[in-house]
Amino acid sequence: MSYSRVVGAVEIGTSKVAVLLGEILEDGGLNIIGHTACSSSGVKKGVITDLAAASDCVHAAISTVEKSAQTRIDEIYLAQTGRHLVGSFNLGATNVSAPDGVIRSSDVSTAKEDAKRKKLPSDRTYIHHIQNPFSVDGRQVENPLSQQGNRLEVGYWSVHGDSQTVSDSLRVIHGIDLDVSDMIISSIASGAVLLEESEKENGALVIDIGGGTTDYVLYRKGYILHTGVIPVGGDHITNDLSIGLRVGRKSAEEFKLKYGRAYYESIDREKTEWLIGDLTIGDRQYPLAAITKIIEARIQETFEIIKDTLMDADIFEPSEIASGVVLTGGTSLLSGIDEAARRVFGIDVRLAEGPGDISKELQRPEYSTVLGLLHYALTGQEEAKEAVKPASILRRLSSIWSLD
């Protein structure tokens, strides 16, 4: 019998906790053997605010999926999100050491180390060092070894997070005596499973809109060029509707799901929608225009923040995002959201579709991140080739505060 290991992909979100179990076989195959999703607790804008509540919720979800699959998890791959995540581009360089100008592995190592030399404050920790292309004397190359030149350069998109926040997410998993083998930023996990290699090569922008955060990743020429997190998601739309319409959050959520559209149309002025719809005491009508205008304002603002950020970084080039925008996450199910994105970005937009060889339920956009985590468990860090391992983070943090 071939050896296999069981990997748990865990996303601790603002609205939900999603757990996906995958059995990875010795021959490289992957069987999805269980999944669950439940309402989250103790999490706000992607950050754990109540460790005990979040732990209870995650532990219950993991226990449920283990019982359903009748197996135990060997290791965990954990998603990371939240405004505390910050990315920056760092360039490393070295003069080629050999007299004949032939680049050797020592030159490559020196350039990489130079790119990652930036030290962080004690309250910050690296999560990803994402390698970009090499260049030799200004000429981009995939593999510089044995090539000839005078100067070797390599860039990294390096992502770091708040040490306490990262520690809290690790504590949740360690609380049930499981090891976190790797942490992957939510946007990168989603992009890994939603895009073909050709789409990454042509350029693509993946936007994952969850309950409390919106994560995004920009690909160009097959590489991750930029990542970011906005502390706004579907829950904020619900809150806007609750305030704007003067109804409770439950009614606001129902309005969003039943009648919501991500952009306003003039015909909305002629329509009204009932709060309950059964003409009972307290039931009343609301203008559809009010609902769509409120949603449009929040969605448009979110997309414009992403676009403005990329423009400020001088990397929003529509001609270099030929594969367009891909929308995923639970809030991407909102009617008309693809059209709303198209109006802001001015390029093709499509809604995410999960792999066709899995169940219809798991193809839903809210499972993109955990599917991406399993992708990394199966293939390794293809894009984030030099991710910082959770074990090393814990060792460093243990010297700052107790993890008991």
Image (spheres, rainbow, N blue to C red):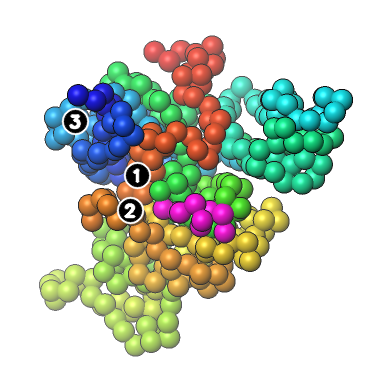
245 relative position to 158: left or right: left
The amino acid type of the residue labelled 1 equals Leu
Q: Nearer the viewer, mark 2 or mark 3?
A: 2
Q: Point out residue 387 in the picture as x, y percentages from the top left corner.
A: 53, 30
Q: Point out residue 265 in the picture as x, y percentages from the top left corner.
A: 42, 82
Q: Badge 3 local density, few (<14 within 10 Å), some, or many (20+)?
A: many
Residue indicated by mark 1: 371
Residue 199, magenta (yes or no): yes
The amino acid type of the residue labelled 3 equals Glu
* Of the pair 182 and 54, the residue shown nearer to us: 182
Do the CB atoms of the residues marked 2 and 1 lie less than 8 Å apart? Answer: yes
Residue indicated by mark 2: 355
- Quadrant of the rendered structure where residue 319 is? bottom right
* Of the pair 92 and 209, the residue shown nearer to us: 92
Quadrant containing the N terminus is: top left
Calculate the distance from the C-alpha at mark 2 to the C-alpha at mark 3: 23 Å
Q: Residue at x 57, y 59 (%)?
A: 202
Which label sits on residue 301?
none
Which comes sooner in the sequence, label 3 or label 1?
3
Report the predominant secondary structure element of the magenta stretch: helix
Q: Residue at x 45, y 54 (%)?
A: 195
Q: Badge 2 local density, few (<14 within 10 Å), some, or many (20+)?
A: some
Which comes sooner in the sequence, label 2 or label 3?
3
198 relative position to 337: left or right: right
Q: Is residue 160 above or below residue 347?
A: above
Calculate the distance from the C-alpha at mark 3 to the C-alpha at mark 1: 17 Å
Span of residues in magenta: 194-202
Q: Point out residue 289 in the picture as x, y percentages from the top left corner.
A: 39, 79
